[in-house]
Structures are given as structure tokens and as C-alpha cells.
Amino acid sequence: MRKLSLILPLAILAFGSVVVNSQETSSPNTYTQSVTREVLASGYPTQDKKQILELVRYTIAPRAKLPTHTHPGMQIERVEAGTLTYTVVEGEAKVTKANGTEFILQKGKTIQLTVGDALVESAGMVHYGENQTNKPIILLSASLFNTNQPKAILTNPENR
């Protein structure tokens, strides 16, 4: 396991590439937040190493808002602590509540995900999440992405 404490722009907070020990000082980007990323396990499902499978624990700081983004592959999350406010901008996400209820969260809809709730994000689905509380959110996240692509792609980088 490796644990990284990061201070980085939200483009990176949104599960993008990792920059270690980097701080922005007086940047025009006011969306800088703190997140901890702990890789619990990772591996390549095939010999050609074209894809990477990762299991990660993210801790999202209070009052952090992730930018609107997509993923180049499938990603699943489960809330371990806190309340994640999650919005689908384009496409849909499959939500499984802690009590086992499953439904599809449609375009333009927002939901509060709490401990035990999970969601499935398909490739290209546009979404964002935020922590509207004063307590951190802890997510377990598994993803299967091509190794040569970023983990998150901002949809409107000029607005973030």
C-alpha cells in the first residue's frame, strides 16, 4: 500500500493523474482542495498491460467540489464515511442504496449518497460530486481504465 497526501487542483482531485508534493500558491484556480489517495491494490488484467485495475481509498475534504468530468472506462464507488452529493450531467449512473434498492440516476438528477451506498459509472458518463458537509468523505473506488489514458477528463476545463 502507498499513501499519498496531496494538495492539488480539482482536476486531479477528480481521480485524475497524481502530482505528489505539489502546492499551488497564488494561482487563479481557486478550486484547490486537499485529498488523500491510498492505493489498496492494483494490477494488469492481461499480459499486454493495456488496462489497469485499481482499488483506491479516497478521502475528500469538507466543502470540496469536484469538477464536471468523465472517465475513460468503468468506475465503481462505495461510500465508507460521510455524505457525497452526486450529480449526473449526461448519461446515467446505477445507484445501489445500502438497503439493496437499485435504480438508475438519470441526466440532470442529484442524489445524496451515504454510508453503504454504491454507484456504477460507465465510460463517458458526465458527472461531478461534492462534499457539502464539514466532515470528510471516504470512498472505496475500483476502476478499469486503459493505462495510457487519464483517469478523469474535464468536460469544461475553462470553467474550473
Image (cartoon, grey):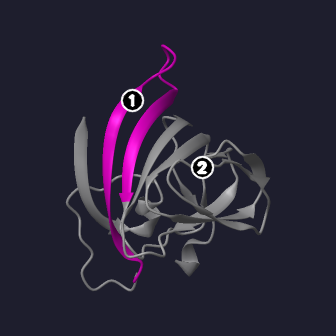
- Depth check: 72 or 35 in front? 35
Which residue ends up furthest to the left in the rendered image? Answer: 21
Quick check: 98 above or below 70?
above
Give x and y (percent) for residue 142.
50, 38
> Residue 7 lies in what quarter of the image?
bottom left
* First of labels 2, 1 by sequence position: 1
Name the magenta segment's main secondary structure: strand
- Rendered view: 55 above or below 150: above
Q: Nearer the viewer, residue 68 or 93?
A: 93
Q: Is residue 118 visible?
A: yes
Report the side of 33 relative to 109 (left or right).
Answer: left
Label 2 sits on residue = 71
x, y percent for residue 149: 52, 43
54 is within the stretch colored magenta: yes
State the residue position of label 1. Answer: 42
> Disc 2 versus disc 1: distance between alpha carbons?
17 Å
Q: Which residues are magenta?
A: 30-59
